[in-house]
Structure formats: structure tokens, C-alpha cells
Image (cartoon, rainbow, N blue to C red):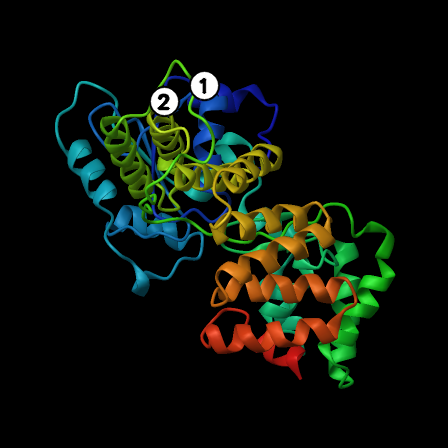
Amino acid sequence: MPSPSPDASGRSSLSEQLVVFTGKLSSLGRRDARALVSRLGGATSDEVNAKTTMLVIGAEGFGPTPQVNAAIDAVGSSRTARETSNKLTRAEELNAQERSARPIRIVTEEEFCRLVGVPTPGTLKQQYHAMRDLLARYRALREDHLRYLVKCGVLRPVMRTNADTFFAFPDVAAIKQANEGLSRGASLRSVVRALIATRQGQLELDFRLDAAPAKILSLRRREAGPPPVPQPPDKKTTWHDSALAEEYFLAASALDDGDDSTEEEAAAAYRRALEFEPYLVAAIINLANIHYKREELQEAEALYLRAIGLEANYFEAHFNLGNIYHDLGRLAESQACYLEALHLNPFYADAHFYLAVTFEKMGRSQEARPHWRAYQQLAPQGEWVALAREFSE
């Protein structure tokens, strides 16, 4: 998350402000934007109402009125692609009414960034190299090539926004080297190995897969028999407790839809479910996923291990734990987790992909090839299928 400028003007500008965001932000995620407003003395809300003082329109979002259209045109959005924002419509309706309070201030994302003292998308492009620009310059490379080099730890982006990924100058040299190798007809595998060899001593640090954790959507019914571990003597789980736990799990799962604004509510609901049923493995795994998304790896690892200790036949727990070990550079442990996940669910395409990546990093390309091929077969429209085809040859 970008750090706000120490200039006190930002704090005074957001003091006692109630800010609402609409549309997709380009410069930072919605959760980071909310946290930034809070740090600068303001508050945020999901809905526009009479208490709202500021509405921020994301650079990837669109507004229907001439006033806002002109502002958005100034930052380069396409007029033909606009969609109506209900929040913007509501703000305009409130502004049109005679209100005793101050009107809602409607600002573009660029203006919001300047107000809070974080780099605007335009400033980032001046300071760093955007992926879009690099792909236009180095034509032998595709976007999935660059993303794979990031997964391997060869490239380390300085910042990711909702609109682009930015690299510092040292990474440009590696990107140029990869482009030259591919232009000469070298295989992607040989190019990656050469780049890894160049940075071999650094690959154990700052490595993160950015893999999407496997989420559990429905509860399994436990077979008749004793629980996996003894119940505490002073607290017994009743069927009524199990029913409440399931209600909270289903509510949490509905909130756990990838939206940053409902993430904490989802986590709280998973925890509530575990109060009624401490051995509800599905809730433990999905709660761990939230910690993983927040890069709280120790908390996530502990929860995955707890889930596996309670019930070892959830492939999701093994796969997600493998991702953590991969992030930490513990490749042998990561490999074991992916293999166990595939033992439980051999049709999970992402496990084949990340196991193949692990084998490649360990220099075991022959063992990686069947998993590249399996990924192609299981996910013929997957985001990595073109890259898997190159590696399986």
C-alpha cells in the first residue's frame, strides 16, 4: 500500500469526512483506500446517504453526467465504455436537493490520490516501468511470461495496482535479456534457468506465488463415529451448536466473495462458527485463506496445520499449505503438500500447475512435464495454458 505524504494538509482535508468509493480504483485496492482514509482522520461507507461528504470515482469506473464525464476524460477514460453508477446517481440527487449540510464532493481518483498524498497512476508511470509499456517494447514476451518470471522470483514488482504492474530499472535488464533469448529462438525453460542462475543467491527471499487459495463452498457431513479429538470436558457440542455453526459458515461463505469491504465480516463469521463447532474444518481452512490473502503467513500456516490435524482428507488444506511453503522458499515441503493434494484430488488443475512450477525451480524438469500436460488437459482455457504448452514440449 502506498504511504501517504507526511504533509498535514492531507489529514485536515479528510478529517470528519465520510468517503464512499464507486467504480474500480486504478492506483490501489479498495481495502487499502479505506485504510488510508481512516489513517488520515476520515471514515468510509458502502452507501451514499445524507451524511456522505465525498464520493471518489475510480479511474477504471465511469459516470454519466457531463460534469463528472469531463473530469474523467481528463484522466483518460473512454466515454463510450461508461456505465451508470448508482452511487453517483444518488450523490447527484442529494446535491440537487436543498440540503442544510455541505454538498457531496465528487472527485476523480487522480484528485483523491493528490489529496491524500499517494502517487497517482501518471506519477507511477514516470517513476517506474509499467508492464503494458514493457510488453509493447519487448515483442517476444507475453504477459504470462512476465507473470511467470514474477512467480519464479526473477522479477520483483515494486508495486501492483488494479490497472497495471510496475517494475524498477534493475528488472528491465532481466526483461530485456528474456526478450533477446526468446527472439533468438531459445526455449522459455532455458531463458528462465539462465535468469534464475543470475539471481540464484536471492531467490529464497521476497518470493510470493499470489496463488488463489482453494476455498470450501459447502460442508461435508461427518460420518457417524467419535470426533477426531476428544471434546473438552466442560463444553460439549450439541446438534443445536452444529446447526448454528453451519448457519454462520454459510453466512461467512456468502460474504467471502473476494470483496475487500466484506472480508473482515466474513472472518468474524467464520470465527463465530468455530465458537459453536471448534472442529469445523471447512471454516478453519477458509479463515486461513483470509489470513493468507492478507499475507499473514504464520497465522495461515497454523490454521492449515490445525485443519489437517483434525481431518487430513481436505485437499484444499494441503494445496494452500503448499502455497505458503512455496512463498517461504521451502520447496521440498511445498512439493510434498502439492503431491498430497493431488493424491486426494487428481483433477485439481492449479495443484498440477504449482507442482510443475516447484519442480522447475528445483531443476527437475522431467518430473514437471506430466503436470504441465495435466494442467493443459484439465484447464484448456486456463490463464497459464499457453505457458504450460511451452514447458511441456
The N terminus, quarter of image: top right
Q: Amino acid at mark 1?
A: Gly
Q: Secondary structure at mark 1?
A: loop
Q: Secondary structure at mark 2?
A: loop
Q: Position of residue 372 (x, y in %)?
A: 60, 74
Residue furthest out toward the top: 234
Instruction: Using the image as rendered, state which of residue 162 and residue 327 is in the foreground.
Output: 327
Q: Is residue 94 visible?
A: yes
The C terminus, quarter of image: bottom right
Q: Which residue is pictured at 32% across the width and 45% down the height?
A: 219
Instruction: Using the image as rendered, state which of residue 2 and residue 276 is in the foreground.
Output: 276
Q: Which residue is pictured at 85% across the width and 57% down the height?
A: 200
Q: Quadrant of residue 259?
A: top left
Q: Amino acid at mark 2?
A: Gln
Position of 385 compared to 157: left or right? left
Q: Eyeballing the image, is 99 above or below 253?
A: above
Measured Cα–Cα span from mark 2 to mark 1: 8 Å
- N-term mark: 2 or 1: 2
Q: Residues within 10 Å of mark 1 (few under 14, many from 20)?
A: some
Instruction: Using the image as rendered, state which of residue 158 and residue 259 is in the foreground.
Output: 259
Q: Which residue is pictured at 50% across the width and 20% down the height?
A: 11
Residue marked by disc 1: 41
Callout 2–callout 1 Cβ contact below 8 Å: yes
Q: Eyeballing the image, is 304 above or below 121?
A: above
Residue marked by disc 2: 17
